Image (spheres, rainbow, N blue to C red):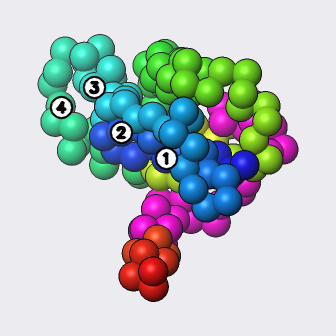
């Protein structure tokens, strides 16, 4: 079983595959992507910035708010725990993709240990995976 945690701008998606098929009981998604972190930061700063401005700061490394990051990390962790629970220990590998996977790399490593796969480019991995999935579906 291979677990995938995709943490994008708007959402996180959780999927577990076995024999290239999703195990329905482990599939979930919620709107707590990176946007949620930026909203927490912006709320703290009295909504003086656009999410675009904060996103630019996040990408260039000038946005640091450990308290709000900890809140968002707890929300993501809580979603993973509520969906997968102790069953997550049975997954052979966990692949984390999306921009949020870069931000939460340490937390995901703590959660999944050596089962977390080191992805070269977590953001582009989403596109590559969708492309490969499309090719696989077209060949059926």
What residue occupies the far right of the structure in this picture? 114
Q: Residue under circle 3?
A: 39
Q: Earlier in the sequence, mark 4 or mark 2?
A: 2
For discs 4 and 1, the disc positioned in front in the rendered view = 1
For discs 3 and 2, the disc positioned in front in the rendered view = 2
Q: Earlier in the sequence, mark 3 or mark 2?
A: 2
- Real-space Cα separation, disc 4 to disc 1, in angstroms: 26 Å
The magenta-colored residue range is: 107-131
Q: Earlier in the sequence, mark 4 or mark 3?
A: 3
Assess whether mark 2 and mark 1 are in contact (beta carbons under 8 angstroms): yes
Binning the other alpha carbons within 10 Å of mark 3 as few (below 14), some (14 to 19) or many (20 upward) gives some
Identify the residue shown where x is 46% and y is 50%: 99
Point out which mark residue 6 bears.
1
Instruction: Determine whether 114 is above or below 65 in the image.
Output: below
- Real-space Cα separation, disc 4 to disc 2, in angstroms: 21 Å
Residue nearest the viewer, comparing 99 with 17: 17
């Amino acid at each position: 079983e291979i677990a995938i945690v995709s943490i994008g701008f708007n959402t996180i998606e959780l999927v577990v595959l076995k024999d290239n098929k999703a195990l329905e009981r482990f599939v979930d998604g919620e709107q707590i992507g990176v946007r949620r972190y930026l909203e927490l930061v912006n709320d703290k700063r009295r909504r003086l910035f656009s999410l675009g401005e904060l996103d630019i700061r996040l990408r260039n490394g000038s946005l640091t708010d450990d308290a709000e990051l900890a809140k968002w990390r707890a929300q993501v962790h809580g979603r993973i725990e509520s969906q997968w629970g102790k069953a997550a220990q049975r997954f052979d590998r966990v692949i984390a993709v999306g921009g949020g996977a870069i931000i939460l790399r340490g937390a995901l490593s703590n959660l999944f240990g050596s089962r977390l796969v080191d992805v070269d480019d977590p953001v582009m991995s989403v596109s590559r995976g969708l492309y490969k999935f499309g090719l696989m579906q077209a060949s059926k």
